[in-house]
Image (spheres, rainbow, N blue to C red):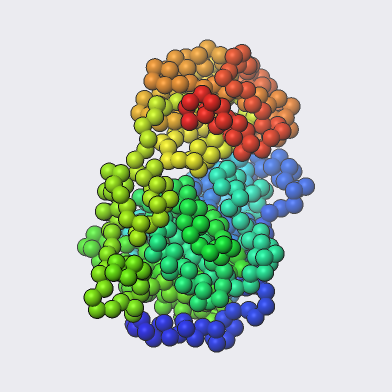
Amino acid sequence: MTNKNALAARIDARDEAPAAVPQHGLNPPHGGILKDLHVPAAEVDALVRRSVEWQAWDLTPRQLCDLELLATGAFSPLEGFLGEADYDSVVARARLANGLLWPIPVTLDVPEALAAKLARDDRLVLRNIEGVPLAILTVGDVWRPDRQREALAVYGTDDTDHPGVRALLASHPFYVGGRIEALRPIAHHDYPELRDTPRSLRQWLERHGHARVVAFQTRNPLHRAHRELTLRAAKSAGAKLLIQPVVGLTKPGDVDHYTRVRCYRAALGHYPPGFAKLSLLPLAMRMAGPREALWHAIIRKNYGVTHFIVGRDHAGPGHGREGRPFYPPLAAQEYVQQHAAELGIVPVPFAAVAYAANRNAYVTPDELQPGDEVRDISGTELRRRLAAREAIPEWYTFPEVADVLRDAYALEAKRGYTLFLTGLSGSGKSTVAQAVSALLLERRARGITVLDGDVVRRHLSRGLGFSREDRDANVERIAYVASEAVRHGGIAICAPIAPFASARAAARKLVEAHGRFVEIHVDTSLEVCEARDAKGLYALARAGKIAQFTGVSDPYEVPEHPELRVTSAGDPPRRIAERIVAWLEREGLE
């Protein structure tokens, strides 16, 4: 294994490496072309109408992240989920079939029952959990992969203590490969100003004249040691710093991304003005160590980055059951360095630093001197102090970051409440519910349960039909879960159609035994809902293919005295959410 000094020497000579960094302008995308897989807006409605004729699949959280990065070009040069030839090549040699570097399989796993219905050139509708079509996949290959082989090649182990391996081996047994056509951007209601696509970030960097950019990937809060290392890395490269944390899926047990982003924002003020930019990456991490580190570098190249900070255990899941790390020290740094010239990005090793109390400074191991008084706080000790609301030394983290973490670890005891959004199908209930949840979580750590009507139908109310009795039973089940969340001091945000006033009154009674019940009528007209018809349901109802459809063949009893009445016809969801939260503040609920 290459020793640390030799590796550092190679990195120090990075600017002399052939074709390591473009001399002018931003780094070109991987493969030369930044892909944008969204279909023209004029074609979306026709595809959505036709989509009711095709097989459909509701994406898992990991697949949803992958779809977003495919659609925006962050996974360039991919144009869809990998077909069998590319998959086999990536697993065996970390390259696509054409030889281009690509270390992580980006695959769409589905159950056998769906795979059996698909053939080459079929169309498969990719939907979110609410059933809204997000993309169309033209089927190329359908096959049963050897997931054990994939685990050993990509993760270096088949040990299910590894979270990535555990998720892989528990996934669906068939893969479907094919090109995608994205119908609409993935909606995010949290931190919209921080969610850059590769194209929008490139445009921002060009406007500000930043041709050299060093990116820092993180899934943890930023403390003083991170600030010191990132500051040194960017200055040594003569580059601007891009702090691009992952806000998709990370290691189970990680601090939630709302808390982490509040920490990043708090720490950002401790960099020199204009030195660092914060941007969020909706990536589903695999925790695949060296291969994933190279994958992260490729993704950052697609965002225009020229330098990439690689951690000592970059994308590593930690230790296995015997206490040994899954990947050797520096393995990720060495793997990225081996491919740096070919990729055209400069890896910057992220070395450990220690706090020398006698010098009141963070120093690298090479800078330590005899007699230095080194201090540290373990993760376990930090969590204990946070939960107990004990002081966190300022040499360890910034006071503003400590305040955010205390908020997350010691939730303020507040009486719970339920927001009960009701309205027609397509009125925007689910979107507004998500926006309200995101806005509340941006502000502080809260226990929030979102009970969307479509999702509840799939799980809590599976087997119920659409008779009045079944509809009332569905609302009663939602109200019961909401009342339990409220009883424990949480917030429940419910978004069923709930067409009947008597069922809504019964729901109010259940919840108000433990806290506030806030009825919100999402008052969007039938004409607007039908014009949207994002799921194609109104068309089916008008054609007689869906019976007892609210607003068409079944009644909707408009709430007479809701606490709030809003409409999604004019304002964006974020603005509606802001009005709802403002009302909650006036009522003393927030």
Residue ID at (48%, 31%): 590
Residue 80 can be seen, yes or no: no
Q: Position of residue 430 (x, y in %)?
A: 57, 34
Residue 64 can be seen, yes or no: yes
Residue ID at (36%, 69%): 362
The correct choice, above or below, for 530 with respect to 318 in the image is above
Q: Position of residue 279 (x, y in %)?
A: 56, 57
Q: Quadrant of the N terminus?
A: bottom left
Q: Position of residue 152 (x, y in %)?
A: 36, 67
The correct choice, above or below, for 23 with respect to 57 in the image is below
Count of labels in the image: 0
Residue sitting farthest toward the left: 322
Along the viewing direction, whichever of 369 and 527 lies nearer the viewer: 369
Residue sitting farthest toward the right: 42
Is 476 displayed left or right of 392 in the figure?
right
Which of the 4 image quarters holds residue 151? bottom left
Residue ID at (44%, 47%): 259
Is 336 displayed left or right of 303 in the figure?
left
Residue ID at (59%, 83%): 19
The correct choice, above or below, for 447 with respect to 40 in the image is above
The correct choice, above or below, for 337 with respect to 34 in the image is below
